[in-house]
């Protein structure tokens, strides 16, 4: 056991180790995919070297030896003496894994290094097989190197002569660098800098700039130094520099000056004459210093996360105080209008406000990390999985610079790994299968991260076989999660969502990768715990897309504040889908449970007062209730609240261990007035109410849909004719903004519009209805509708009205009259009205996309 | 606990007409009564939580713990913040009277008749008479 094992440096060492391992992993993958590139190898080499050095410093002997062997192999690759084979890469990856494991066990407090002999043996073998002939090759190269010539030009000669005359010493210092030194130029430069401390370097041979380029560089550099110091001092100072094999000093005097001038052949330097045993510590430090100089790295400080959390807490408090200060300021300025001090107070308060806002932003940023830290681990994993399952996979990562809270990065790692494994194992087919289906042999998995408002969206898309809803159904019925009866009512989407139940797997065989059916449920609960949402879109034989939406940070969320009685509660805005006012008359009771109908959906209604033991305000006269629809995954619940206050950023705080877990409450926060408000646990409410509800929902929908009053329709005009679409498909109506045309779009696609940061395609229905193309008029509007799960814009000449259209007056379309009767659901005819009820799905014929949640 | 002479200091609080003492070592601070937010579905004697300089601190009600009717809050009402298992927990009392030490501490009454007897450590004798000493661990413990 070494002294360093328990030292303060261990943490730094482990952190650094992780970085270097990651670097190695990445670069090796590069090596594998792109092939042998100089800078990749250079990178690998540096990483291995750093590892080697630091492990030696920390006293991990086995690790040091292993990394040394690895470095040697890399050296062979670098010299082009060892081909990069997959076998070699596998060994190297195994080595990295071993080191990773070692790192883990050190983290866990186990200082045993494990046995490296097998790996060492394998590395040795490779090296052995490679280094037979090549070494000779190297030597022959060396021999053919033309001897180094020192030639002074007139200026240098004059300088040296003057120096000699005025009593300086002039020396030719021969420095020979170690063979394995990777950055000879830097090293040579270092020597030069060192020498200038002792005197003036008049010249050096070969010129330093040439070293990098010159392949014939022997490793010996001769510096001509003008100095007053003695030989020993200079040698001593040079030996502090690592990776220098030997130093030899030759005095230049007036006597032998001429010889130099004519051109003097530098004799081979005898090896290791003045060599002092070097210390590894020095070496490591220097290597690091040099790499840092070479590669421009942003300066960083490692800070304990806990310390940051503490600071963030303090900032949170400051924000609350600031809010309070502002309100008292407003009060005081009202009271003492004419007091000069009040103005000063106002100035100070508004300045403080600005500073606090900046401070909060800054603190938040300290918690953010690019998701690269997480994504970086995956290429390697996917590669291994692909090899294991004999699949060819192209793994594409997009948006790795996306930043999110560091705690989230840790938390989503497992779910992502799980989904990726699934994609590789079940999603993608074997190359033969793919070829048979006419797909490229190489499967593609795309991992993408992006910001969307206050959310981060991560998608994992594969182009594999998709999820077979039938199989899921079978499995779910067999496991008894749903009855056959229930299952037959379920939409395909609902069936697919069943894979999130524990024990459901569509894999025929259980492999060691996945297939046991445990996991997806864990994935889901994990993501829900983070206030996130997971969704699947799948098409048979085309692939599956998992979409995960997460709040950017765990610590601060946007939330909707609502009042229940006299208490304030916060609902995470992520979960809020809609707020509307419900007529008490619209509340129905189905199977003893209250439900309400909204946009043709039947949703369970939850009276929060009772669940949260809040005194209900006894105002019987209220015929309209505030209802907040919250959603989690596919579940929707209507919450009855007394009042909505507004949305606000809140800092999530736990209730602490003493109170523990409390139903319906996910945590607490402190409001601007200093009071505590609870955050509703939407997941819990949705699970509780949603699950008890699923069954009746399906049954009830059918009955509800045929309503005597008739559905509500939005009617609009196109070229003078009346059309209608059901209102539940309607999202929004807006004046026509600038439409950006798209290249090579079909005639009925006008282009895209930009609406609150989202892009929507805009369609013109006229071409398909046999009308002339769209011309903008003052009454023109764009209706944002939901068609096959997509939100699209449709231009119309005029939006007429919203009215219920009774089915009684609807007539089937006359197939034999119309060319394309599919496009019409029905024709509504009453009094003088004649309204075409359009079927947008069939008209636009969009690829079905399941509605995203949230 | 034996009847011993103690140099320990205690903070004496009042609840209705009853006086209780808490060892000063257990007490983090004493603050004025502030807005308490109830925590639905939690333990019945938990009155709620307060914001103590950015920390969420649970507050328990001694009255509810002892099973006696809640006393009304007044200007004298205080929250005594006590350290318990690395957390801070507040106790609402009607008033905090003084800091004192007891010449003699006697074992608590065996009797079940006294409300909250199971939360007492003993009875301290001072110039003002007898004051029951609260056992913080038992007060907060056992659900």
Image: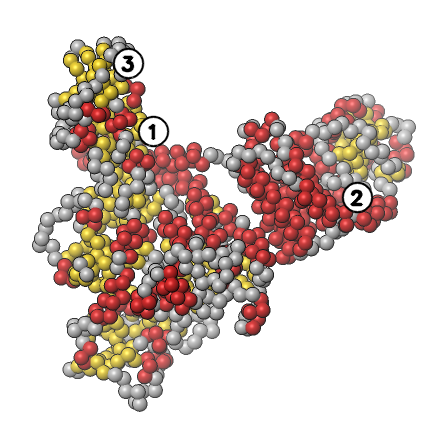
Horizontal placement of A330 versus A287: left or right?
Answer: left
Q: Residue furthest left?
A: A621
Q: Is residue A220 above or below residue A712?
A: above
Q: Residue A782 — which label?
A: none
Quarter where residue A765 is shown? bottom left
Regarding mark 3 in the picture, which secondary structure is present there? loop
Regarding mark 1 in the picture, which secondary structure is present there? loop
How far apart, in angstroms, are the residues tagged by discs 1 and 2? 69 Å
> Percent x, y for residue A517?
44, 57
In front: label 1 or label 2: 1
At 78% from the left and 23% from the top, the residue drawn is A232
Q: Residue furthest bottom?
A: A816
Label 3 resides on the chain identified as B
Q: Quadrant of the C terminus of chain A?
A: bottom left
Q: Is residue A472 above or below residue A267?
A: below
Q: Is residue A773 above or below residue A644?
A: below
Q: Residue B85 — which label?
A: 1
Label 1 resides on the chain identified as B
Q: Residue A217 — which label?
A: 2
How far apart, in angstroms, are the residues tagged by discs 3 and 1? 21 Å
């Amino acid at each position: 056991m070494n002294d360093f094992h328990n030292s303060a440096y261990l943490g730094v060492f482990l952190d650094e180790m992780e970085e270097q391992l990651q670097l190695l992993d990445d670069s090796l993958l590069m090596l594998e995919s792109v092939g042998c590139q100089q800078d990749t190898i250079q990178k690998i080499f540096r990483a291995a070297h750093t590892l080697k050095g630091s492990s030696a410093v920390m006293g991990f002997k086995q690790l040091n030896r292993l990394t040394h062997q690895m470095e040697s192999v890399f050296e062979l690759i670098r010299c082009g003496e060892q081909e990069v084979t997959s076998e070699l890469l596998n060994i190297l990856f195994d080595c990295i894994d071993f080191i990773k494991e070692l790192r883990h066990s050190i983290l866990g407090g186990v200082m045993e290094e494990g046995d490296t002999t097998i790996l060492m043996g394998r590395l040795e073998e490779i090296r052995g097989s490679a280094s037979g002939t090549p070494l000779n090759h190297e030597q022959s190269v060396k021999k053919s190197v033309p001897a180094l010539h020192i030639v002074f030009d007139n200026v240098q000669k004059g300088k040296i002569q003057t120096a000699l005359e005025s009593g300086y010493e002039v020396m030719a210092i021969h420095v020979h660098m170690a063979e394995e030194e990777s950055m000879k130029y830097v090293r040579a430069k270092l020597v030069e800098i060192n020498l200038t401390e002792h005197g003036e370097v008049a010249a050096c041979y070969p010129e330093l700039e040439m070293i990098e380029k010159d392949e014939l560089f022997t490793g010996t550099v001769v510096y001509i130094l003008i100095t007053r110091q003695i030989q020993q001092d200079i040698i001593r100072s040079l030996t502090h520099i690592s990776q220098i094999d030997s130093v030899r000093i030759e005095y230049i005097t007036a006597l032998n000056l001429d010889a130099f001038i004519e051109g003097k052949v530098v004799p081979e330097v005898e090896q290791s004459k003045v060599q002092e045993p070097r210390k590894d510590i020095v070496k490591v430090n220097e290597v690091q210093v040099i790499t840092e100089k070479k590669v421009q790295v942003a300066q960083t400080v490692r800070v304990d996360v806990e310390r940051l959390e503490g600071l963030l807490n303090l900032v949170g408090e400051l924000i609350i105080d600031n809010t309070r200060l502002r309100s008292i300021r407003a009060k005081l300025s009202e009271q003492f209008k004419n007091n000069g001090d009040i103005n000063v107070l106002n100035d100070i308060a508004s300045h403080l406000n600005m500073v606090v806002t900046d401070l909060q932003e800054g603190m938040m940023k300290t918690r953010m990390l690019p998701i690269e830290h997480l994504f970086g681990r995956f290429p390697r994993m996917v590669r291994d999985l692909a090899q294991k399952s004999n699949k060819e996979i192209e793994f594409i990562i997009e948006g790795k610079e996306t930043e999110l809270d560091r705690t989230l990065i840790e938390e989503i790692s497992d779910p992502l790994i799980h989904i990726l494994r699934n994609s590789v194992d079940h999603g993608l087919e074997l190359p033969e299968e793919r070829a048979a289906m006419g797909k490229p042999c190489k499967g593609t998995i795309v991992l993408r991260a992006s910001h969307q408002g206050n959310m981060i969206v991560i998608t994992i898309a594969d182009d594999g076989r998709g999820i077979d809803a039938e199989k899921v159904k079978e499995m779910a019925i067999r496991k008894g999660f749903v009855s056959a009866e229930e299952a037959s009512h379920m939409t395909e989407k609902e069936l697919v969502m069943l894979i999130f139940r524990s024990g459901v797997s569509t894999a025929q065989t259980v492999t060691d990768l996945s297939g046991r059916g445990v996991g997806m449920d864990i994935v889901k609960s994990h993501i829900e715990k983070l206030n996130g949402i997971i969704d699947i879109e799948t098409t048979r034989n085309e692939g599956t897309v998992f979409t995960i939406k997460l709040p950017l940070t765990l610590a601060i969320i946007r939330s909707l504040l609502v009042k229940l009685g006299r208490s304030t509660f916060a609902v995470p805005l992520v979960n809020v889908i809609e707020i509307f006012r419900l007529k008490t008359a619209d509340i129905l009771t189905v199977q003893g449970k209250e439900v309400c109908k909204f946009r043709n959906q039947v949703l369970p209604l939850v009276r929060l007062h009772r669940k949260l033991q809040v005194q209900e305000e006894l105002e019987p006269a209220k015929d309209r209730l505030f209802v907040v629809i919250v959603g989690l995954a596919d579940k929707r619940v209507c919450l009855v609240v007394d009042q909505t206050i507004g949305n606000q950023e809140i800092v999530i705080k736990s209730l602490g261990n003493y109170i523990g877990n409390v139903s319906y409450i996910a945590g607490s926060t402190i409001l601007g007035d200093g009071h505590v408000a609870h955050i509703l646990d939407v997941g819990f409410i949705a699970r509780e109410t949603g699950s008890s509800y699923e069954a009746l929902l399906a049954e009830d929908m059918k009955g509800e849909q045929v309503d005597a009053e008739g559905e509500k329709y939005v009617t609009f005009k196109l070229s003078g004719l009346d059309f209608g679409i059901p209102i539940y498909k309607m999202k929004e109506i807006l004046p026509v903004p600038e439409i950006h045309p798209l290249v090579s779009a079909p005639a009925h696609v006008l282009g895209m519009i930009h609406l609150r940061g989202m892009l929507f395609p805009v369609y013109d229905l006229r071409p398909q209805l046999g009308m002339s193309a769209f011309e903008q008029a003052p009454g023109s509007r764009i209706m944002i509708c939901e068609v096959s799960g997509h939100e699209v814009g449709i231009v119309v000449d005029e939006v007429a009205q919203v009215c219920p259209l009774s089915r009684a007056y609807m007539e089937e379309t006359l197939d034999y009259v119309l060319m394309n009767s599919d496009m019409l659901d029905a024709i509504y005819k009453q009094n003088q009205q004649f309204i075409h009820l359009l079927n947008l799905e069939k008209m636009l014929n969009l690829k079905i996309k399941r509605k995203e949640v949230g | 606990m034996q009847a011993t002479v103690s140099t320990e200091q205690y903070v004496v609080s009042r609840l209705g007409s009853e006086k209780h003492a808490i060892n000063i070592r257990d007490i983090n601070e004493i603050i004025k009564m502030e807005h308490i937010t109830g925590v639905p579905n939690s333990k019945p004697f938990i009155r709620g939580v307060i914001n103590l300089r950015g920390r969420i601190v649970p507050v328990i009600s001694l009255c509810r713990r002892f099973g006696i009717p809640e006393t009304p809050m007044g200007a004298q009402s205080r929250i005594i913040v006590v350290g318990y298992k690395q957390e801070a927990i507040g106790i609402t009392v009607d008033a905090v009277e003084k800091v004192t030490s007891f010449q003699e501490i006697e074992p608590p009454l065996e009797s079940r008749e006294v409300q909250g007897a199971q939360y007492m450590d003993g009875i301290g004798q001072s110039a003002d008479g007898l004051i029951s000493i609260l056992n913080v661990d038992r007060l907060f413990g056992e659900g």
